Amino acid sequence: MLAMTDAAAEAISILTAQNGQDAAGLRFAVREETEAGAQLALSIASAPEEGDQVLGTDTGARVFLEPQAALFLDDKVLDVQQDEEGQLSFAVMDQP
C-alpha cells in the first residue's frame, strides 16, 4: 500500500483545503504504461471516482488511487521535495 510522509500529508491537506471541500483529495491515475514504469496523472479531486482506493491520514489528508495506479504505487512512498526556488513537488520513491 502507498505510504505517505508527514510532509506529503501536510502538502495534500493544504492543497485540498484551498479547494474548499472537506472530502477532496489528491488523485493518481495512470496516464500511460510503459516498459520502464507508468506515467501518472496527478490532480485534485473533490471525491474519489468509482473503484478508487482511498487512503487517509489522521490529519485529514486523502489520496485517491485509480485501480491501475494503486497497483503501480503499492510498494511506494509519497513525499514532497523542494527545489532551489522553493517550489514543492511530489515525489514517488521505493519503500525502504
Image (cartoon, rainbow, N blue to C red):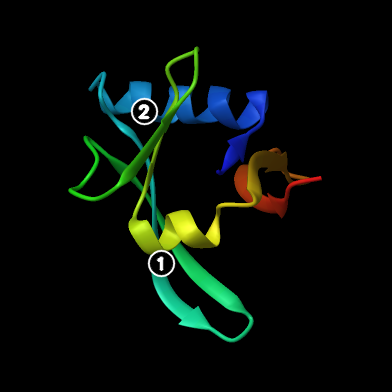
Where is residue 23? Give x, y as percent: 25, 24
Q: Does residue 94 appear left or right of residue 43 in this picture?
A: right
| In the depicted structure, whether residue 71 falls above or below residue 38 | above
Residue at 66 percent of width and 39 percent of height: 80
Where is residue 14? Give x, y as percent: 46, 23
Task: Give the total number of marks visible in the rendering.
Answer: 2
Rendering quarter of residue 67: bottom left
Amino acid type at image mark 2: Thr
Where is residue 34? Give x, y as percent: 53, 84
Which sits earlier in the primary sequence, circle 1 or circle 2? 2
| In the depicted structure, whether residue 25 falls above or below residue 40 | above
Residue at 50 percent of width and 13 percent of height: 58
Residue at 24 percent of width and 40 percent of height: 48
Q: Residues within 10 Å of mark 2 (few under 14, many from 20)?
A: many
Quick one: SS at disc 1?
A: strand
Amino acid type at image mark 1: Val
Residue at 29 percent of width and 47 percent of height: 52
Residue closest to the eye, 82 or 26: 26
Look at discs 1 and 2 and give the one toward the viewer: 1
Q: Does residue 50 appear left or right of residue 25 in this picture?
A: left
Residue named by callout 1 = 30
Q: Residues within 10 Å of mark 1 (few under 14, many from 20)?
A: some
Q: Can you tell which mark lies on residue 16?
A: 2
How far apart are the alpha carbons under marks 1 and 2?
A: 21 Å
Where is residue 51? Give x, y as percent: 24, 50
